[in-house]
Amino acid sequence: MTRLSITKAYKMYVGGAFVRSESGRYFQVSANDKSATGADPETVNIPLGSRKDARDAVLAAKNAFDGWSARTAFNRGQILYRLAEMLESRRDELTASLQRAGLSAKDAEAEVGASVDRAIFYAGFCDKLTALLSSYNPVPGPHFDFSVPDPMGVIAVVAPAKPALLGLVSTILPIIAAGNTVVAIASKDDPRTAVLFCECLATSDLPGGVINVLTGDAKEIAPHLAKHREVAGIDAWTEDAELRAKLEAEGSDSVKRVTTHGTPVDLKWYDAADPQVGQGLGFLERFLETKTIWHPVGV
Amino acid sequence: MNHGTIHSSQASSTPGSSVVARPRPSFSGTTVDKVAIEERVGALAKRSIKKQAKVAGLKLTTSMIDLTTLEGKDTPGKVRALCAKARRPLASDPSIPACAAICVYPNMVPVAKEALAGSGVHIASVATAFPSGQSPLDIKLDDVRRAVDFGADEIDMVIDRGAMLSGDYAKVFDEIAATKEACGPAHLKVILETGELGTYDLVRRASEIGIAAGGDFIKTSTGKVQPAATPAVTLVMLECIRDHYLATGKKIGMKPAGGVRTAKQALHYLVIVKETLGDAWLTPDLFRFGASALLNDVLMQLEKERTGNYAASDDFSKE
């Protein structure tokens, strides 16, 4: 007996819920013919996120910020570790999804493995970054003087088009590890794997709204995030030089911290032999403010 | 319905309430079609209001807000800050109108009176053992008179929901009538606390009693009970106001309170008012929002329309 095919409705992840675009728009992504999964190539609808979806996601991220940043660093680490567990248990599904987007079985497997390792890496970093980034400053007077890192708030991320999964994981996890919340625009080339990643987020004890993932056209959505005064920073990984310039210009009115990166295709995101590649303190400290406290000696 | 004889003699013998001259209605009650009401508000919620119409609607909303703080932790400082915000909601934009009123507990009325002197912003005070209303009538009436003496020009009273639910409509009616008399020149808003009444039929009946007993406004909720104001319950009350107007020619005001937090919701309410009662009710004299968080969201949307950018919540003063 033949079974009816069950097609999956891919949705964006906002405020801990899977939602369609408020605009009702979709774009289509088709499976690559080279698919090694054996399944028939299929074309699926993906929500085409709009300005208002971005606004809703910022609100969700803003509402999640107080609770997330107030958690202990240790607890944030536990939750990221739980995320790694969820990714690990869905490795096959993630690998198949990357293959549908055109990766070879070997490359897809390597990317998923690296993504899980990266989640573990930042899980371990959560309760260490304050110690690593803080200082006791000598000052000319009877004061103790400390500088400590503080999360900035809502950070928008334009995730690299490739690698679709490892790029998303590598850009957003260091941002939330420090207590920020994120609105990310997933790779338009392979939004399905990003949605699958969100399904792992939804089962990982991560509070709703800490990571929000929109699908669609970064060119359309990102400028609205750059203008939004609630957004404290933007991390844009895009080859589109025009968009990078636009985000820098639009972000200036609200004095946002805008970091833009052209993403050359040969940029290396992972090297099993070199732990400095694609991760580290450099990623963690980009969206932190430094808070300096003066305290009189002897009080 | 044969309740209330005993209570009415109690009410009229209470010192200070003198005699309840107002004739009691029949308390027969009009039934409400739940499905139709919910369909109707659902359909009205689909209206899309953009650009100039949105700006006009949001400014009208601002002028209809009873900016409210009803907490045990209220201080004179907080009330003064709220009064300043009611007078001039957004310092940078004088085209945004002042709020209709400040709504506070009686003890805060003198503070508000001083802070609002000469501004035209009204002072509403809750009274009658707000929010439960579970006190003897003479205490409730004393509460009202003191609030008026302190300088309140609007009194928000609560009805006795226990009496309402047990069918003692005459008691509810007599207490409202006595409160109206105690108000003197002050306007009376009658809070039904619809979240505790349970059915639309009872909301409709309570509305009829509130209007017949002399309420100038009927109001959904105290804000202390969930659910507070909903569009459906507001429509039920507005239809009661409409029927009263058609029968007598007298205009009664409406105030949804509690649960109206976003500009979008507020515009939805204005659509319901316009479609039920027409433009005549789209004025602060006949329609109010009881709210605190709503004002900042309205200001945020107005700034969005003015600048084209979404604002941050920290851009607006909070208490």
Image (cartoon, coloured by chain):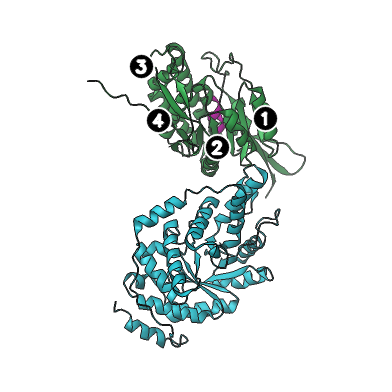
Chain colours: A green, B cyan
* Residue A127 shows in the view: no
* Distance Cα–Cα, label 4 vs label 2: 20 Å
Tell me the kind of residue under disc 1: Lys
Q: Are marks 4 and 2 on the same chain?
A: yes
Region in magenta: A170-175
Q: CB of mark 1 within 8 Å of CB of mark 2?
A: no
Q: Which residue is mark 3?
A: A39
Residues A68 and A47: in front is: A47
Q: Nearer the viewer, residue B274 or A143?
A: B274
**Which numbered dot is residue B116?**
none
Q: Secondary structure at mark 1?
A: helix
> Is A242 placed left or right of A278 in the picture?
right
Residue carrying label 4: A9
Q: Earlier in the sequence, mark 4 or mark 1?
A: 4
Chain of the residue displaying label 1: A
Report x, y in % for residue A117.
Answer: 47, 22
Do the dots labelled 3 and 2 sit on one chain? yes
Q: Chain of mark 3?
A: A
Q: Is residue A174 magenta?
A: yes
Q: Nearer the viewer, residue B306 or A266?
A: B306
Q: Tell me the distance, in whole angstroms, between the alpha carbons under discs 3 and 4.
A: 17 Å
Image mark 4: chain: A
What predominant SS class does the magenta segment belong to?
helix
Give the residue number, with chain letter if any, for mark 2: A54
The kind of residue on which mark 2 rests is Ala
